[in-house]
Image: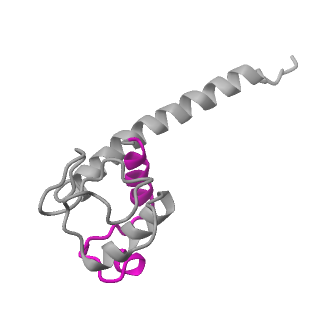
Amino acid sequence: MTSKKLVPSAAAVVALCVAVVCSVRAQDATRAKLLFVGACAGCHGLEPRTDDQAPSLSGVIGRRAGAVPDFKYSSAMLSANFVWDESRLEAFLADPQAVVPGTRMAFSVADKRERADIVAYLKTLQ
């Protein structure tokens, strides 16, 4: 008896890959929201408003640093001359003082994957 190799069709391989990627993205989206709630939501809101503790992160990607109206930023953040993008946010979460020396944000996220997930979550809030 000869054995035949079972070779999946290209469509089957693509379908499996799509299913795996979609599953991972769904888990990452849920994980990212939980990370945001655990790491950021204590100070930052998601509503396009301001409060006394920290600026809203609604629409942060693409926004000029220090630009939420009526929020009292540090002079360091007010003089920061950049627009928030994914790489800048990731770097800021890793080490706020390195990105904006003198910022009042003292919290950082050590884990690279957690930072990436938080930034990806913020990107969905545009």
Residue 107 is inside the magenta segment: yes
Q: Position of residue 40 (x, y in %)?
A: 25, 57
Q: Is residue 35 above or below residue 9?
A: below
Which residue is more in the foreground, 61 or 91? 61
| Percent of width and height locating residue 12 | 69, 21
Q: Is residue 1 left or right of residue 65?
A: right
Q: Is residue 96 visible?
A: yes
Q: Residue at x 25, y 46 (%)?
A: 46
Coordinates of residue 82 in the picture (x, y in percent): 46, 68
> Which residue shows up at 20% across the image and 49% down it?
49
* Residue 99 placement: quadrant: bottom left
User: In the rendered view, would you say 97 is above or below 28?
Assistant: below
Residue 8: tell me if it is visible. no
Q: Residue furthest front?
A: 69
The residue drawn where x is 34% and y is 45% is: 31
Magenta stretch in the rendered image: 96-124
The quarter of the picture where the N terminus appears is: top right
